C-alpha cells in the first residue's frame, strides 16, 4: 500500500467525507485532495502536521512505512479517551451521590432515634 492509499484509509477510519478531510489537510477544495490521492504523490510534512494536529493518535510511522498500526491508540480516536474519561467521572459522581444519600439516611434515622 502506498502513502496516499494509507492517507485515504485514515480518512475512512475517521469517518470523514472528502470535503471535510480536504479541509483538515489544508486543501482549498475536495478536488485538490482527490488529485493528491490519484497522483500517487508522497505525503508532505505539512500534511503530516495537519493530520497530527487534527488527531494526535495518528501513527506517522504507519503512514510513511506501512508498519505498525494506523493509530497509536488502536481505537482510532483520541477523542474517545476524553469521552471515556468523562463517562468514568460521571459514574464516579453517581456512585458518590448514592453513598452520600445512604449517609444522609443514616443520619436521619439516628436523629429520629434520639
Image (cartoon, grey):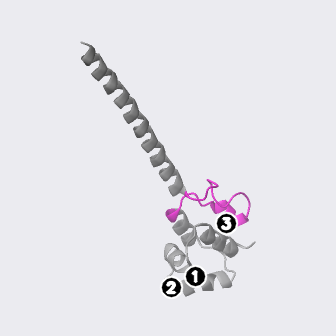
Q: Secondary structure under badge 3?
A: helix
Foreground residue, 88 or 64?
88
* Mark 3–mark 1 distance (CA, rounded to whole Å): 16 Å
What is the crowding at mark 1: few (fewer than 14 residues within 10 Å), some, or many (at least 20)? Answer: some
Q: Secondary structure under badge 1?
A: helix
Give the residue furthest to the front.
113
Foreground residue, 58 or 91?
91
Q: Quadrant of residue 105?
A: top left
- Dominant SS of magenta comes to loop
What is the crowding at mark 3: few (fewer than 14 residues within 10 Å), some, or many (at least 20)? Answer: many
Residue 64's place in the image compared with 83, above or below, is below
The stretch of residues the image draws in magenta is 53-77
The residue indicated by pointer 3 is 63
Q: Residue at x 54, y 71 (%)?
A: 46
Q: Residue at x 50, y 63 (%)?
A: 53
Q: Which mark is residue 29?
A: 2
Find residue 4 and report its horizontal and vertical position in percent.
67, 75
N-term-proximal mark, 2 vs 3: 2
Give the residue furthest to the top.
114
Residue 90's place in the image compared with 75, above or below, is above
* Mark 2–mark 3 distance (CA, rounded to whole Å): 22 Å
What is the crowding at mark 2: few (fewer than 14 residues within 10 Å), some, or many (at least 20)? Answer: some
Foreground residue, 109 or 42?
109
Q: Quadrant of residue 64?
A: bottom right
Q: Is residue 86 magenta?
A: no
The residue indicated by pointer 1 is 33
Q: Are marks 2 and 1 in contact (CB under 8 Å)?
A: yes
> Which corner quadrant holds the C terminus?
top left
Q: Are marks 3 and 1 in contact (CB under 8 Å)?
A: no
Amino acid at each position: 500500500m502506498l502513502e496516499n492509499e494509507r492517507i485515504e484509509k485514515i480518512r475512512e477510519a475517521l469517518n470523514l467525507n472528502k470535503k471535510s478531510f480536504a479541509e483538515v489537510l489544508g486543501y482549498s477544495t475536495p478536488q485538490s485532495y482527490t488529485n493528491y490521492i490519484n497522483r500517487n504523490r508522497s505525503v508532505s510534512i505539512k500534511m503530516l502536521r495537519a493530520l497530527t494536529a487534527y488527531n494526535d493518535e495518528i501513527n506517522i510511522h504507519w503512514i510513511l512505512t506501512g508498519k505498525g498500526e494506523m493509530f497509536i491508540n488502536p481505537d482510532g480516536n483520541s477523542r474517545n479517551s476524553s469521552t471515556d474519561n468523562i463517562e468514568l467521572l460521571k459514574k464516579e459522581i453517581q456512585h458518590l451521590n448514592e453513598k452520600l444519600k445512604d449517609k444522609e439516611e443514616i443520619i436521619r434515622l439516628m436523629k429520629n432515634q434520639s
